[in-house]
Image (tube, rainbow, N blue to C red):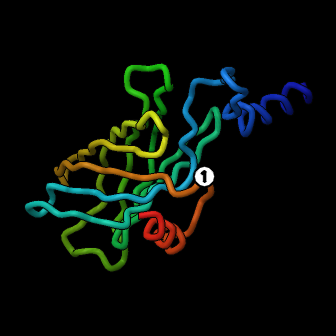
Amino acid sequence: MGFYGLLYNLFDNLLWRLQFKAIHLSDIPNIRGTWVGVVQSSYGGGTEVRGVILYVRQTWSKLSIQIEIETSRSFSTMAVVNTSNSSESGLKYEYINEPGTFSEQTMQAHRGTANLRLTPDGATLKGEYYTGRGRQSIGAMVFHKISTQFLTREIALKQANHSS
């Protein structure tokens, strides 16, 4: 059992994302890391928020999403990555958004759902979101991968500005 546990742990954290020429051990795309992007929202008659940070923590068996902007944070409550051989490779998740200390008084905690499609080169996630009761807004999101590591907000924004 110890050998099985060690092998499972090695596959779960590392082997699933390796590629040996044309051989893939898993069809799940590796989207883990830090992404920087823009969110356009219908809220308040239409707004655009730049410098949005998307963190994807991913192993073969686990996935969690976190989005940070200056005034709030969102955390996934459930998430799935569609495989690279599906009709629409990408990320789908449900989240809870928590307003920050300095957010508008009218902003309340709310739930939402996002659907992001992964480009064939694996460098961009692009899609839509909508929120539930209490917020009732829709919007579009575009994120570009900055690093496979988890960077601080400041470092991620600096790297995004240098690459543009």
**Three-letter residue code for mark 1:** Thr
Name above or below for residue 8 compared with residue 44. Answer: above
Which one is nearer the viewer's eye here, 163 or 103?
A: 163
Question: In the figure, is residue 134 to the left or right of 86?
Answer: left
- Residue visible at 48% across and 33% down in the picture: 81
On the image, the x and y values in percent for residue 45 come to: 8, 61
- Residue visible at 57% across and 46% down in the picture: 32
- Residue visible at 43% across and 29% down in the picture: 89
Quadrant location, the C terminus? bottom left
Quadrant location, the N terminus? top right
Task: Describe the element under mark 1 as helix, strand or loop.
Answer: loop
Residue hosting label 1: 148
Q: Dot 1: few (<14), some (14–19), or many (≥20) neighbours within 10 Å? A: some
Q: Count of labels shown?
A: 1
Which one is nearer the viewer's eye here, 37 or 109?
A: 37
Name above or below for residue 8 compared with residue 38. Answer: above
On the image, the x and y values in percent for residue 72 come to: 36, 67
Name above or below for residue 21 compared with residue 103. Answer: above
